[in-house]
Image: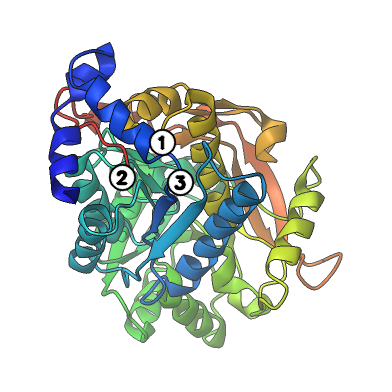
């Protein structure tokens, strides 16, 4: 019976948009199950290179779910979750997504840090029409060539971050750059974006040093950097890999010898590690120390929800997971439905005030790429913290339109409405 219902839903795209034909049949089924729990599939990377961030974003998603359930759930339905660790592996992530949709009746999928895993999840989700929220994968391809009608991207991408930070570094440090690149999808695309911005701004990439995923020995790369003596070293290395890189840079006393730029910094990777784990300039979408309305209240709610968690202040990946989930629920409440086609149209017109986002500038969903356009922050290590957890010094904030990834709109080809199955659980 479950598969029969799914086949019915998958073939009524035109009917849903026109409120005619098979729509009435499916609507009757939806009404008859209105009191069934609404199941959210959590597709987070709880192990692997980005395990720390995956666990952190899952907590943010769960906090938004808990708050919604306190208010009575959604459309009279309690929200429940199914969860499976993708491990940051594309094949495993695809299997997780398929099981959640076909066997566990997940209404929506949320979560992802490793871009290869997120891409795999979204491909499966598009086949069935299940809306997928990519909360924290930042490869430009996620809202570019690998975009999908059902996928919405909630983090800034590497081009947004590079645009924000490269121009300032060019002026402040010099024109000759070395790139240290993690040799997989996110790393290569991040480095490509940095290269294009450097060269467009009049600089030169003198060499790009590729390192394998899960690299722990960077001695050869550091020796080569010494030989090249560049103005700037820009890294596209993340997760546990960048922790190892930073330790070795510090041990080699190279942290002050060159200007270092890390395209993006995730809070769980540096929390509690001390100043040796954080040097150079980096970008983020949010920081708990921003003196903006709503931030302190959000921190307090975070601490109440996570009383025994080692990370005592929320960071960017938690924030992204929470905010994305909250906006899904708001869209469901505004439309009064869980039907994917109606929700996609609603989300494509999403506009959010700076106050609501606890950022400096208003945010909006790009309807052509399905990536949220938001404030990008440039930061460095805080040498004068107000308290032990105040480890970032925010240097500047860039408006969404100034950091927007114009190339994404050119490479993104969203599926047509007719090619996107209607989906509702």
Asked whether disc 3 touches disc 2, contact meaning CB atoms under 8 Å apart, the reply is: no
Residue neighbourhood size for the residue with mark 2, other residues' Cα within 10 Å, grouped as few (<14), some (14–19), many (≥20): many
Q: Nearer the viewer, residue 323 or 172?
A: 323
* Closer mark to the observer between disc 3 and disc 2: 2
Residue at the disc numbered 1: 371
Residue at the outermost right position: 386
Query: Looking at the image, is mark 3 or mark 2 earlier in the sequence?
Result: 2
Residue at x-position 31% and y-position 68%? 86
Residue at the disc numbered 3: 162
**The quarter of the displayed image where residue 47 is located:** bottom left
Asked whether disc 2 touches disc 1, contact meaning CB atoms under 8 Å apart, the reply is: yes
Q: Nearer the viewer, residue 393 or 219?
A: 393
Residue neighbourhood size for the residue with mark 3, other residues' Cα within 10 Å, grouped as few (<14), some (14–19), many (≥20): many
State the SS at label 3: helix
- Residue 253 visible within the image: yes
> At which x and y percent is residue 114?
34, 62
> At which x and y percent is residue 37?
44, 50
> How far apart are labels 3 and 2 at the CA level?
16 Å
Residue at the disc numbered 2: 142
**The quarter of the displayed image where residue 130 is located:** top left
């Amino acid at each position: 019976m479950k598969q029969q219902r799914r086949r019915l839903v998958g073939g009524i795209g035109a009917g849903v948009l026109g409120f005619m034909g098979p729509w009435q049949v499916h609507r009757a089924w939806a009404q008859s199950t209105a009191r069934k729990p609404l199941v959210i599939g959590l597709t987070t990377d709880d192990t692997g290179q980005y395990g720390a961030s995956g666990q952190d974003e899952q907590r943010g998603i769960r906090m938004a779910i808990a708050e919604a359930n306190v208010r009575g759930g959604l459309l009279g339905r309690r929200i429940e979750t199914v969860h499976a660790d993708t491990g940051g592996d594309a094949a495993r992530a695809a299997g997780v997504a398929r099981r959640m949709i076909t066997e566990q009746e997940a209404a929506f999928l949320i979560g992802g840090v490793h871009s290869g895993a997120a891409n795999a999840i979204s491909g499966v989700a598009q086949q069935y029409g299940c809306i997928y929220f990519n909360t924290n994968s930042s490869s430009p391809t996620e809202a570019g060539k690998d975009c999908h009608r059902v996928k919405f991207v909630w983090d800034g991408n590497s081009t947004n971050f590079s645009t924000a930070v490269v121009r300032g570094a060019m002026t402040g440090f010099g024109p000759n750059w070395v790139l240290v690149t993690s040799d997989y999808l996110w790393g290569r695309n991040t480095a490509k974006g940095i290269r294009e911005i450097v060269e467009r701004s009049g600089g030169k990439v003198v060499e790009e040093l590729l390192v394998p995923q899960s690299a722990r020995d960077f001695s050869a790369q550091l020796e080569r950097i010494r030989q090249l003596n560049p103005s700037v070293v820009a890294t596209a290395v993340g997760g546990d890999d960048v922790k190892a890189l930073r330790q070795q840079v510090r041990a080699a006393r190279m942290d002050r010898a060159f200007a270092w730029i890390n395209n993006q910094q995730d809070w769980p990777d540096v929390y509690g590690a001390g100043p040796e784990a954080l040097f150079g300039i980096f970008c983020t979408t949010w920081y708990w120390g921003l003196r903006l309305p709503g931030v302190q209240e959000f921190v307090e709610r975070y601490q109440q929800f996570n009383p025994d968690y080692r990370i005592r202040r929320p960071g960017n990946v938690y924030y992204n997971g929470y905010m994305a989930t909250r906006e899904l629920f708001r869209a469901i409440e505004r439309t009064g439905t869980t039907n994917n086609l109606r929700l996609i149209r609603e989300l494509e017109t999403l506009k959010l005030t700076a106050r609501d986002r606890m950022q400096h500038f208003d945010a909006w969903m790009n309807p052509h790429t399905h990536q949220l356009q938001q404030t990008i922050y440039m930061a460095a290590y805080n040498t004068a913290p107000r308290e032990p957890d105040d480890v970032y010094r925010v240097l500047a904030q860039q408006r969404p339109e100034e950091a927007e990834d114009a190339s994404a709109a050119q490479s993104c080809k969203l599926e047509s409405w007719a090619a996107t199955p209607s989906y509702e659980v």
